Each structure stands twice: as C-alpha cells, then as structure tokens.
Image (spheres, grey):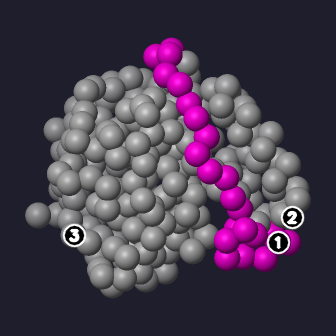
Amino acid sequence: MSIREPAVAGSFYCDDPIDLADSVMQCIGEFVDAGVHAKALIVPHAGYIYSGPVAGAAYRLLANSCNDIDRVVILGPCHRIALQGLAVASYEAFSTPLGDISVDIPACQNLVDKGLVQYSNEAHQFEHSLEVQLPFLQGCLAKFTILPIVVGACSIDDVYTVINALNVEGTLFLISTDMSHFHTYQQANAIDNFNIVRMLNFDTDLTGEDACGSNVLNGFFKFCDHAKWKIRMVKYENSGDTAGDKEKVVGYASFIVY
C-alpha cells in the first residue's frame, strides 16, 4: 500500500500517539450538540499550540453529525510548491501517529478523469494545511475515508465545480485556512474582524492577504450561496492570544456551515 507519511509530526503536533491523542482532546474539550448537522467546517492549520484551540472549538460541534459522516473532503492551500489548479494524490492512505486513514481513490480518479483536478504527490508530500486536520478527524470520527485536495492558483469556478461534484450524502467538507499574517496584535484583530463579517456573508473576493486559503474559500462560498447553506462563526483568536508575541501575529478563525 502506498502511504503518505506524516511530514509535520513532531513540529506542528506531537509525534507520540498517546501525547497526540491527549493534545487533540484537550483542544476539542467536551463535545457539544451544535443544534445543526454540519455540512462543513472552516478551521485553521498552524501548530496546535497556536491554532489548536480554535480548530478544536469547531471539531467539538461534530457531536451530532459524526454518525452521518463517512467521507471528509479536505481542501487547503498549497504552501510548498507553485501549483496551478487543484491536486489530489495517488496515495492509498495518509498516516498520522494515530494510524492510517484510507483515501477515497475512486473519487480521486473520477475527478482526474473529468479534468477537474490533477495528480501531484509533490504538492501533498510536505503540505501541512491538510495534514494537521487528520488527528482531529481521528479524534472525532470512527470510520471514514478522506479525499485530500491541495489548492493552488485557480479560479472560483474551479473550486466550485469540484465541491459541487463531491457534494453527496455522508460527506463533510473541511476547509483549511488561516487568517491575516504578521500584523501587530491590534491590526490583526481589526483586519480579521472585518474579514470575518465578509466570510459570514459568503463574500467571494477574498485575497491571500485576508486568508491564505482565499482560493478555496471563494469557490466554497460561491457553492454555499448557491446551495443556500448557512454559516456561523465558532471562535477567533490569534497567535498573540495563544503562544506567540503580539508584534507579528497570525489570525485563526473557525466556522461551522450547515
């Protein structure tokens, strides 16, 4: 079996399985009935000491959705290479210290056959925006497959079309993005609060300055608006609130879409 081995275990999160499981559950805390069934989560992707509590606040809302989810489509920005379009990988599973997660290979191949995505193991090999979500999913869900998609330079419609093709019963969409980068604490709060309002309105003109996953968000929000989905913010903090100084911070926000 071809397996994508973890690239940021031991740096972004613990590489010891016992410590990692404990870290994930500390971030999630008590599971909460969200009052709705989640169709998607938007969560950050920094090291757990920085953004883990913000991500965990969204994951804990899967309590009344987890039994209905058998596949998670994860879309995140490409940080490591210059990627044109969207890319899946040919790996049969993605591994974390908590175990292996099977990839929905037929769905990947179907997207490639339709010309909606390309295969690129290079884009996935060291990409953290998808990987850091996997232990959280392993802490929340029992039996599921994943469909990881790295998103590079592309149009809104490129992302919209992929999401539309994958929107079937039992699928949870997981959108991985951080907010503003390297402003002062006060500046980051102002910028991020402004952009959170835009996100709550499903704006589709976000830029990389607003959120590193802007290409994913814009296409996703177009789909949400078309599908008449609803969104609710869960938690906002920045690295100045968690584990960093307040001179150059990164913003983190999480949302539930239902």
Residue 168: x %, y % from top left: 27, 26
- Alpha carbons under labels 3 and 1: distance apart: 36 Å
Q: What separation in Å lies between label 2 and label 3 (alpha carbons)?
A: 38 Å
Spot occupied by residue 82 in the image (x, y as percentages of width and height): 55, 54
- Left or right position of 2 against 29: left
Residue type highlighted by circle 2: Thr
**Number of marks:** 3
Decide which of 95, 153 is in the foreground and name it. Answer: 95
- Quadrant into which the C terminus falls: top left
On screen, residue 103 versus residue 117, left or right, reads left
SS class of the residue under badge 1? Answer: loop
Q: Which residues are magenta?
A: 226-248
Using a 10 Å C-alpha cutoff, classify the residue at mark 2 as few (fewer than 14 neighbours), some (14 to 19) or many (20 or more). some
Task: From the image, tell me which residue sits under label 2.
Answer: 184
Looking at the image, residue 188 lies above or below residue 173 = below
The numbered mark, 3 or 1, whose residue comes first in the sequence reads 3
Residue receiving disc 1:
246
Question: Looking at the rendered structure, which numbered label has been put on residue 99?
Answer: 3
Residue 137: in sight, yes or no?
yes
Q: Secondary structure at mark 2?
A: loop
Q: Is residue 13 above or below residue 86?
A: below
Indicate left or right for 126 with 255 as reference. Answer: left
